[in-house]
Amino acid sequence: MRENAATCVRRLLDSLTDGDFRYEMDSGEAISVSISVDREKREALIDFSGTSPQSGTNFNAPEAVSRAAVLYVFRSLIDEHIPMNEGCLDPLKIRIPKGSMLSPAWPAAVVAGNVETSQCVTDALYGALGTLAASQGTMNNLSFGNDRVQYYETIAGGGGAGPGFDGADAVQTHMTNSRLTDPEVLEKNLPVLLESFSIRSASGGPGRWHGGNGAVRTLRFTENLSASILSNHRRVAPFGMAGGGDAKVGRNTVIRSDGASESLTATAAIELQEGDKLVIETPGGGGYGVEN
């Protein structure tokens, strides 16, 4: 089974070309990756040299995160039905520089590595391969609570377009398998009303195949509590590919009970009072190909 998986990846490598990509994050750090295919050995080197040094933020990611992203990306490009297993990585050599944000040294903070940086590594790999525009590139991690209740969710966004297909609207993309709590369960158990959850029109990137639209999620709180948002692509737009356009960036906004509005950064903590609303507008996905 492992040998079969490796053989499938080697067949995939026969159709790929070398490429590189630099992916900037809202925090200013950048992920750099180059992919070099050795056609004689039917192997590939995935080299993250040039990636930013480990950061004082929590967007550092343990090496296992990048390794998982490589496995995911190459497996997703194989049409054959094979079990996921370590054989997929046998023809792939992964080089991650020590001391970078993708291989940090203790005591670097890594809480956003699995939920945010993983998305960025995935999109950077697709960018280097030229196979898929960026998806929303974030999980839009929202948490809130007080002394009585606590809650955490991730919020869907737009999927990237590719050759021959549009990106999907308002879905969880790539390195996540989370689902949202049903509105009825959410409102029954927590001091919150879900005022709206809708597709964010025209937020996907234009192109021959357009990127998927993000989502708009509006929560109104019925008790005082604290909230935090951990997200990305509020400054840097998800990229288009092969002439396709970039998607719209996301926005995080607090609307106070008196109507006053406050814009939040990509990562923020906020005190909310009864009657306040939190509006999360998630990024879309990039478009692919030049529009006709």
Image (cartoon, grey):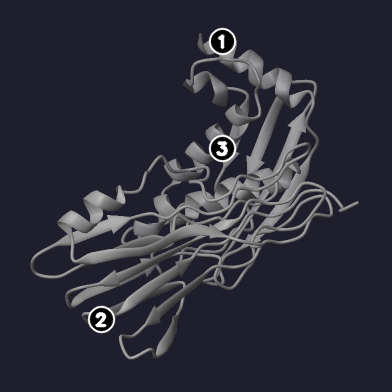
| Amino acid found under the numbered disc labelled 3 | Val
Which numbered disc, 1 or 2, marks the residue that appears first in the sequence?
A: 1
How far from the left and from the top, in percent, is residue 263? 46, 83
How far from the left and from the top, in percent, is residue 110? 36, 57
Q: Is residue 77 left or right of residue 120?
A: right
| Amino acid found under the numbered disc labelled 2 | Glu
Identify the residue at horizontal 33%, vertical 91% (top origin). 258
Question: Which mark is in front, 1 or 2?
Answer: 2
Identify the residue at horizontal 42%, vertical 87% (top origin). 261
Element on which disc 1 rests = helix
Q: Can you say whether 237 is above or below 97 in the image?
A: below
The residue identified by callout 1 is 3
> Is 92 in front, or is 225?
225
> Is 200 in front, or is 73?
200
| Amino acid found under the numbered disc labelled 1 | Glu
- What count of labels does the image hold? 3
Q: In the rendered structure, find residue 271 and report the number of the disc placed on it.
A: 2
The residue identified by callout 3 is 70
Observer able to see residue 209:
yes
Element on which disc 2 rests = strand
